[in-house]
Image: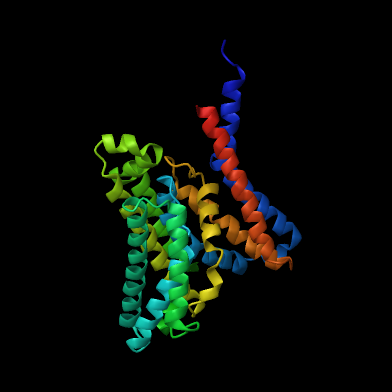
Amino acid sequence: MTDSSAPASMRASALLSGPARIVLILALIVVAFSIASFDAFASFANIRNVGMAASILLVMAVGATYVVTTAGVDLSVGAVLVFSGVIAAQTMQYLGGEGWGVALAGLVAACLAGLVWGLINGVLVAKAGIPALVATLGTMGAAQGLAWIIAGEDLKDVPLELGDNVGIGDIHGMPVLVIIAALVTLIGGVWLSQTRFGRHTRAIGSNPLAAREMGISVDRHLIKVYALAGLLSGFAGLLSLARYGSTTISGHATDNLSVIAAVVIGGTSLFGGRGSVFGTAVGVLIPATLENGLIMVNLNTFWRDVMVGVVLVLAVYLDQIGRRAAR
């Protein structure tokens, strides 16, 4: 006998786990803070600040979307950002600290540093067979520790060209950081949804054994995916350096939670096989908006971590409901 309630439950779970869910959550947060402090929270200047803060998280989250789509996880993104920022700052300081050429050298150094950590993560997961949770937890500690050992303290030698034009600059009123993050999202979203690389990424997340039988080099692909995540974390390290004018070594302890939450809230399945970079773009606004709003209403920003944790657990639970309904 056919269960007539199955279609209804599937429609309900699809609604709860689809784009409508994240838009609804974000809208509720915006409405709540607007009611509490409209003049401060809803001002153009504050919306601009939220966009700039979310941009750095979004660049990391694009790479993390690929990792989570393979049923993996990368806990090292915040530490890699910090390490890459330190390497970039020291490179630029060594080269004189001023000029676009120096800033470009810092960009290359940051991206290379992030790429190396991403390759290490990929090799540990794909070749050594270490669970991604353990491998990236280890590299998180190593990258954070090495950042402190190399720098000793926060470094602040940032070229004015980088800070003024990228960190706080804008083009026709649109912050440069937001433009950069939007371009990264557009490229990452199209690459995941429309290319063979994206199809292979989803196939590995759905069933790695079947992916091998299809002729996909799973190990090589996983290394590429983690390398991409590391590269984008390194790039985010330079963007953070440009925005804050400092390496802010201690300021990224919860970035991994914010990034993973954004990815999962945005509709990427923590169990692999399904990913949406464009959903991540909306999901990343939730922790950024929460932190900003809590400041506006004079509440302890640690409540942001509590709320993000609750939303993350809820998102995974709804994902499980959707998977069971689909089966």
User: How many marks are shown on the rendered structure?
Assistant: 0
Look at the image and tell me whether residue 68 can be seen. yes
Give the image quarter of residue 200: top left
Colour style of the rendered protein structure: rainbow
- Looking at the image, which residue sits at the far top? 1
Q: Is residue 214 left or right of residue 16?
A: left
- Looking at the image, which residue sits at the far bottom? 96
Give the image quarter of residue 180: bottom left
Locate residue 99, reporting x and y percent.
34, 85
Locate residue 126, reporting x and y percent.
33, 51
Look at the image and tell me whether residue 179 can be seen. no
Question: Against 158, is 203 above or below?
Answer: above
Give the image quarter of residue 320: top right
Question: Against 50, is 6 above or below?
Answer: above
Q: Residue at left 42%, top 51%? A: 131
Question: Against 40, is 25 above or below?
Answer: above
Locate residue 292, reporting x and y percent.
64, 65
Q: Is residue 290 left or right of residue 226?
A: right
Task: Pick the residue in front: 291 or 273.
Answer: 273
Question: Against 133, is 57 above or below?
Answer: below
- Looking at the image, which residue sits at the far left? 215
Task: Pick the residue in front: 311 or 185.
Answer: 311
Q: Residue at left 44%, top 76%? A: 147
Locate the N terminus and report the quarter of the image it occupies: top right
Locate residue 287, reporting x and y percent.
59, 58
Q: Is residue 202 left or right of residue 196?
A: right
